[in-house]
Amino acid sequence: MADRLILLPIIIPFIAAVFLLIAPKGARYIKEAIALIATALTLAVATALFGKNINYTAQWAGYGFDFSLRCYAFSSFIVLAASFFVFLVTLYSTVSLKGKNYAKSFFVYLLITLSFISGAVFSNNLVLMLFFWEGLLITLFGMIAIGNPQAFKTATKAFIIVGACDLCLMVGTALTAKIAGTLTMSEINISLAGLGSLAFILMMIGAIAKSGSMPFHTWIPDAAIDAPLPFMAIVPAALEKLVGIYFVARFSLDLFKYAPNSWASTLLMSVGAITIVLAVAMALVQKDYKRLLSYHAISQVGYMILGVGTLVPAGIVGGLFHMLNNALYKCCLFLTGGSVERQTGTTDLNKLGGLWKKMPVTFACFVVAALSISGVPPFNGFFSKELVYDGALERGLIFYLAAVGGSFLTAASFLKLGHAAFIDKPRTRLDATKEAPLAMLIPMIVIAAICVIFGVWNALPIKALICPSIAEARLEGHSFGGFHVNATLVIITVLVLIGALLNHIYGVKKGGSGLKAVDHIYHAPVLSNIYGKAEKRFFDPYEIGLKLVNIMSKVTWAVDKGIDWVYNDLSVKVSSGVSLTVRKFQNGSYVRYIIWAVSGAALVIAFLAKGVK
């Protein structure tokens, strides 16, 4: 019976979602109560499963498609983290979604998402993993679509982008199973020779798309505006990072075998570095609280992919530690954004200002999370970033420069956001604004406190959560708890952060407000043109794809019309012309008919005579 405990994180939230669907509409607080109880029970079970080794297998569909689950250090850690964040966001949502007509639907989708995440992470069979993985695509679409009347377009965009990448994952999975000769994930460890390389690339496309990496990211900023705020706090900010990076690490460290200096490692690091720089550059110039945070949700995943992609101990530990840290401070940041939106009615930075006096607890939580994501010591983000820096520098200076440059822009953008929303003079009348309700504050306070604890006592999460998730051979005997960072790199990081502060001070003096603190970067030569095109979606792969589809549709329309013209117009005119011409010779004259017959016979005889010769 003990091995069936692994089924509960899948079953409990799913059954709760079913109960929510059939619950009477008129009952007050029933949806909140069911969601809170289910997520609390799931968290309790996930806590009981943490650190245990459990294998559960049942016959499912034959042909090797077993219902096979595996609980071990890494998978139990991810399910525990996911359950923890979903519980806190559920508590937050009981107040933030009060009065929203889509609240019930949101809780249903959220519970199913938690169920499918547990299933995907615990899966030890490739086909079972795909079953749960694709289920997440449906809940992703649903949670975005319920946001507002315009959200369906954004939901469709997310569905197409992530769905196309999931198709790549399916093909990669089939190739992997063919090469390995098994569907059991714990038994797979194939090289990158031949089709193995293609399988790796296809599976990585699916994994990094789920984590929100470039170039599969463009639905996230749109969802920040259209989707319910709790969705942004839990799915792109936390759950997809946990699941996506879990599978990036699982594929990199377990399913495929390759060296740190291989092309696959360099490819992953390049994707990570590009994601860091380009996404944070876009975050820097945003004028909306949630949209700015959404670009940081994209940028931060670059550090995780870069760290894991190094395949060196410091980088791997740093990447996975940053995965956890990002889920913490990014969730907290979006929750502060939700509090601001609920209390002021807007997240437009042009309409905010002076909130630190009216919402002091929200502001304090924002400061802690902002310092964490910026990599300021001694917060948790500082230690995970330093480990990533260390691993990146070991692989190449260019990767380190991209990572540390991203930190400069991250700090600059959060100085701008905090100054504009909380410090600047109010740009509109916000006299009635007051602090968010306690149920919304508790999750923020808890997460902010953990950001501090995981920084000051970073050995706790590294030794208890991160290192046990990695094979001992990968760690090469290293221990990363405490202040285990390169002193030179720390000095450089501090100088970069001071540079960001000086840049902010200069920008505020030049622009006259925190909102305009980075305008001198936006309007810089060359950059202004690039930013202008980016804001018009000139570089958006989805928009480029739509244009190509539009061109193809016009071409195929023209071809279709051409075919119609050939059959409906040209053929009719030709047959009509031929029939009219024939009619001229068929006028009823017997003499003419005899002449035609004799002439034809003469031609036949001449042809036959020529053949005889």
Image (cartoon, rainbow, N blue to C red):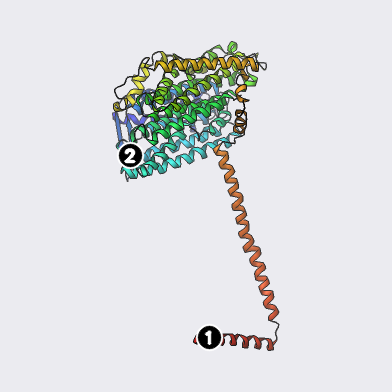
- Asked whether the residues under the numbered discs 2 and 1 touch, taking CB atoms below 8 Å apart as contact, a structural biologist would say no
Residue found at x 55% / y 36%: 155
Residue 526: name its quadrant. Answer: top right
Residue 29 sits above or below residue 179 on the image: above
Please provide percent x and percent y for residue 107: 49, 28
**Could you tell me the amino acid type at mark 1?**
Lys
Please provide percent x and percent y for residue 259: 34, 33
Residue 254: name its quadrant. Answer: top left
Q: Which residue is mark 2?
A: 191
Q: Report helix, strand or loop for mark 2.
A: strand
**Could you tell me the amino acid type at mark 2?**
Ser
Q: Is residue 185 visible?
A: yes
Please provide percent x and percent y for residue 416: 58, 18
Q: Which residue is mark 1?
A: 610
Q: Residue furthest top?
A: 357
Please state which of the two labelled residues, at mark 2 or mark 1, is closer to the viewer.
1
Q: Is residue 110 visible?
A: no
Q: Is residue 277 left or right of residue 247?
A: right
How many C-alpha atoms fall within 10 Å of the one at disc 2: few (<14), some, or many (≥20)?
Answer: some
Q: Is residue 548 left or right of residue 581?
A: left
Residue 488 sits above or below residue 170 on the image: above
- Say whether disc 2 or disc 1 marks the residue closer to the N-terminus: 2
Query: For this rendering, which residue is in front, 401 or 326?
Result: 401
Q: Which mark is residue 178?
A: none
Q: Report helix, strand or loop for mark 1.
A: helix
Query: For this rendering, which residue is in front, 204 or 48?
Result: 204
- Real-space CA distance between mark 2 and mark 1, rounded to the nearest whole angstrom: 72 Å
Q: Is residue 159 left or right of residue 58?
A: right
Residue 54 sits above or below residue 345 on the image: below
Please provide percent x and percent y for residue 606: 56, 86
Residue found at x 69% / y 78%: 583
